[in-house]
Image (cartoon, rainbow, N blue to C red):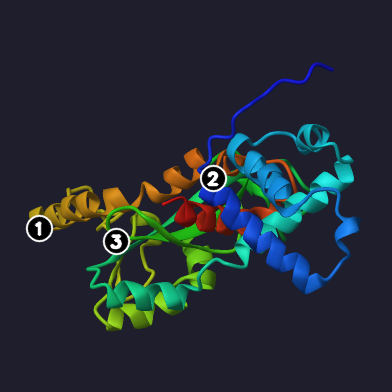
Amino acid sequence: MIPYAAMLDVPRHVVEYLARLLTGHRRRIGPPKSSRVLGPFRQAMLVLRWFREAGCVHCLARDAGIPQATGYRYLHEGIDVLASQAPDLHEVLRRCHAEGMTHVVLDGTLVACDRVAGTTEKGNDLWYSGKAKHFAGNVQFIAAPDGTPLWVSDVEPGSVHDLTAARIHALPALYPAARDSLPTLADAGYTGAGIGIHTPFRPHPDISSPLAADNRTHNRLLRGIRALGERAAAELKQRWRALQHVTISPSRIGAIAKAALVLNTSWK
């Protein structure tokens, strides 16, 4: 083994923010200081390296001088501490309304993962996404008009449709917000979501003629306004590369996405 120096491309205040959260968590659970191999700052470095580099946990543990099992425990602890800081959707929508936002953008993203056991009633793999043709978890998110990520949902298996996932996690809060003059823009995958959720018009399957001119104009305007908001998922995945492919349990994807959202907010 030949050691070498490396730089973590994360602002120091983000590392210090996570270290403070970990310090508070350790005080709450109350283990003796001598029982911890790494201090809060070094644990924060391990967690952030995993988020930024999507590296193997045993390599991170080796670099930190700790056993692999301890590395996994420290990683999951960091994910949970961050995810607990993620805002509630009702809180996010109230803030959007107070700041005078004209709308929010609803979209879903598939986070690739390793295969796990689990089947649907029809015998298909629960986590296999027919849309993406690989195993994944479905996460819904809300973005500001300028594309800033504001909220992410818990994970649903990749076989779950966006509209179904939104009905579970997002729509119950978005309907009251729409009544308070904060509509939601979404793509055609959310057609039929309900009043206040604006989606493109689609041609009737039994009619070959094109859409009317006013409907085409509506679609063009909606697509243009929604485009900025739809970069939110890409921002999270590109900055926090652990979201590009999750190798730990897919059931953790929701917590990982929420933790990435909190880190993304603290970055600015």
- Residue at (54%, 45%) from the top-left corner? 12
Residue 74 position in % (x across, y down) = 78, 51
- Find residue 50 and report its horizontal and vertical position in percent: 66, 41
Task: Tell me which corner region of the image, top left, top right, bottom left or bottom right, holds residue 214.
Answer: bottom left
Count the marks: 3
Residue flagged by tag 3: what amino acid is it? Thr
Q: Quadrant of residue 251?
A: bottom right
Mark 1 burial class by Cα count in 10 Å: few <14, some 14-19, many 20+: few
Q: Would residue 259 be visible to someone looking at this image? A: yes
Question: What label does residue 214 carry, if any?
Answer: 1
Secondary structure of the residue carrying tag 2 is helix
Q: Is residue 160 visible?
A: no
User: Comparing marks 2 and 1, which lies closer to the viewer?
Assistant: 2
On the image, the x and y values in percent for residue 133 come to 58, 38
Q: Which residue appears at 57% of the width and 67% of the height? A: 85
Residue 3 lies, with reference to residue 82, above or below; the image says above
What whole-number distance in Å separates the C-alpha atoms at marks 2 and 3? 41 Å
Residue 65 lies in quadrant = top right
Instruction: Report which residue position mark 2 lands on.
Output: 12
The Cα atoms of the two marked residues, 2 and 1, are separated by 51 Å
Between marks 3 and 1, how big is the CA–CA gap?
Answer: 14 Å
SS type, badge 3? loop
Q: Which mark is residue 1?
A: none
Residue at the image point whose x is 61% and y is 43% from the top: 51
Relative side of 268 to 125, left or right: left
